[in-house]
Image (cartoon, rainbow, N blue to C red):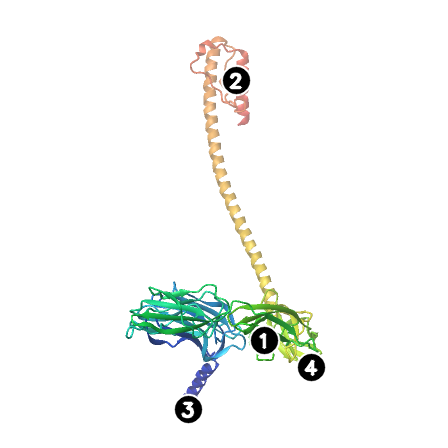
Amino acid sequence: MRIFRLKNFLVLSAVILALFVCSEKVFAAALNFTPDSGNFKVGDSFSVSVVVESAESAMNAADGVIYFPADKLQVASVSKSGSIFNLWVLEPAFSNSQGTVSFEGVILNPGFTGRRGKIITISFKTRKEGTAELSFNSSSVLANDGQGTNILQSVGTAAFQIGVAAPRTTTDGVPPAPVVASPTHPDSEKWYSNSSPVFEWETSSGATAVRLLNDRLPTSVPSVVYSPPISTKTLPGISDGIWYFHAQERGAGGWGGITHFRYQVDTAKPEFFEMKEITRDDKTEPRIILELQARDRASGIDYIEIHVAGKTIRWKDDGSHRVTLPPLPPGKHIVLGKAVDGAGNFLADSIEVEVTPLEPPVFTDYPQTISSDRTLIIGGQSKYPGAQVRVSYGRSGERERTQNVRTASDGSFKLVVEGRLPEGVYTFRGVMVDSRGAESLPSDPISIAVEPTVFVKFMRIAKDYLAMLVLIVGLLVLLLLLIMYLIKKAVEFRRALGKETEEAEEAVRNAFSALQEEVENQIAMLETITSQINPGLTNVRNNNTNMGNRHFPHGLKFPSSKKWVDIVPTRKHYLFLKTLVRSTRADR
């Protein structure tokens, strides 16, 4: 008994272990802020990076909307520098009125796997004391699995404490150098295409004037005086190059320290950009090498973005001026290139490249029809040993399946279709793929009909015959019910007709009896009158006692108001009555 229980326990344990092993592993990703906390004063500036964590599986896309309190924080800029994304579906954007920052980017194959992949960097400026919280909304992280699976499991938050800034005071009446910031050009090391920079600073208490200067020298002394002092300045129409904004405040003790704020402007496109294809000896080579030449005088070329065959490459020159494109399918392709400088300005170029296809495979051995309970095997031949044949097949109107098979040393191949195919007509096409990734055009299609098994055919025939038999029996039952109904109605009609006939006969007999009685009365009256007028016409009653209905179709009626003594019967009248009586007797 104990051995039996032990066996059951081992079997159950094995089943549970198999379930855990075979269960699909769910990979998770997270979006976070770094840093996620800090203490600042009103008027301070700080930066927060948005990072993605996907340590267990590769991700290739992410998007999100970040909320911040617009009354406490103001976005000065959003930077893509150092981002793991190389293609932006939606350029990072912000709205200080709504308190939002949005982004949507893509990473090309093989995607990103890691714990701190930087997406964007947000530069904030504090506006009001209190707690400023950052949070994500409508966010997603997609796995690099070809299906766009959302693997985002958690999102982080951030909270920053903003205190009241101590007022800037003068020392011995001399103010310190003002702290200058620029919401349009926040990073002194970056280039910007905006030619109208804005500068802001906080005026020190006790300051009576401020003087400013904008030039290309790093240590100039400002000379343009504003009294009373101002705290912001916009400089429209600045030309390209490196510039310095100088600011200095004056207090009761004189002019204080000078701030020299550097900023860089580049509004012009790159001067030159050209793409050329490096000549290939083998035109079937799918990896095309391009030679790229680009030049920008001000900010320099930051990167080159290439679009071809639905793919995007973000490439930075390593000094070789050459880039290898990913394997391209056979045919002609337009390569679009965009040289982007340090300020985001770009110059575009395009060229046409062509990849010659390989020879397609040929299906040589396959059945025209096959039963659905049998394994389908298709043989073929190609010119490429050790290559791969990608076979696509499916029924009309359905999504095609794909199965790969490798060719033998003589180029032949044999495809064993996985699983049993449901019945229907299938179309098969093959594409040759070699070790370089070069492909052929699809082969000529073949059609194979998958038929039901003998048992299924028999069951279908039996089902059809059974359905026909049920239909015939149903019709016969309906016909029988209809005949029974008609017989019932006929019997009811006959009974009703017999009853009505008897009633009619009774009515006729009663009518004839009444008529006979009336005629006899009339004859008796006539005999009486006739015997008084003409004794020769007598015994009318004895010779004519009955009247026929066919001689009196509407009945015989003598007006009772007429005095019979005023009627003088003639022989014609007597003969007429006599004829009627005879006819009545004959009918009886």
In front of the other: label 1 or label 2?
Answer: 1
Instruction: Tell me the distance, in whole angstroms, between the alpha carbons under discs 3 and 2.
Output: 129 Å
In the rendered image, which residue does mark 3 sit on?
Answer: 3
Which of disc 2 and disc 4 is earlier in sequence? 4
Question: Residue 547 location, x and y as percent?
Answer: 51, 22
Instruction: Tell me the distance, in whole angstroms, between the alpha carbons under discs 3 and 4.
Output: 57 Å
| CB-based contact (under 8 Å), mark 3 and mark 2 | no
Instruction: Tell me the distance, in whole angstroms, between the alpha carbons under discs 3 and 1.
Output: 40 Å
Question: Residue 525 location, x and y as percent?
Answer: 45, 15
Question: Residue 193 location, x and y as percent?
Answer: 49, 67
Q: Which amino acid is tagged 4?
A: Pro
In the rendered image, which residue does mark 2 sit on?
Answer: 577
On the picture, is 418 further left or further right than 242? right
In the rendered image, which residue does mark 4 sit on?
Answer: 385
Residue 15, quarter of picture: bottom left
Which of disc 4 and disc 3 is earlier in sequence? 3
Residue reaching furthest left?
A: 172
**Which residue appears at 50% of the width and 19% of the height?**
542
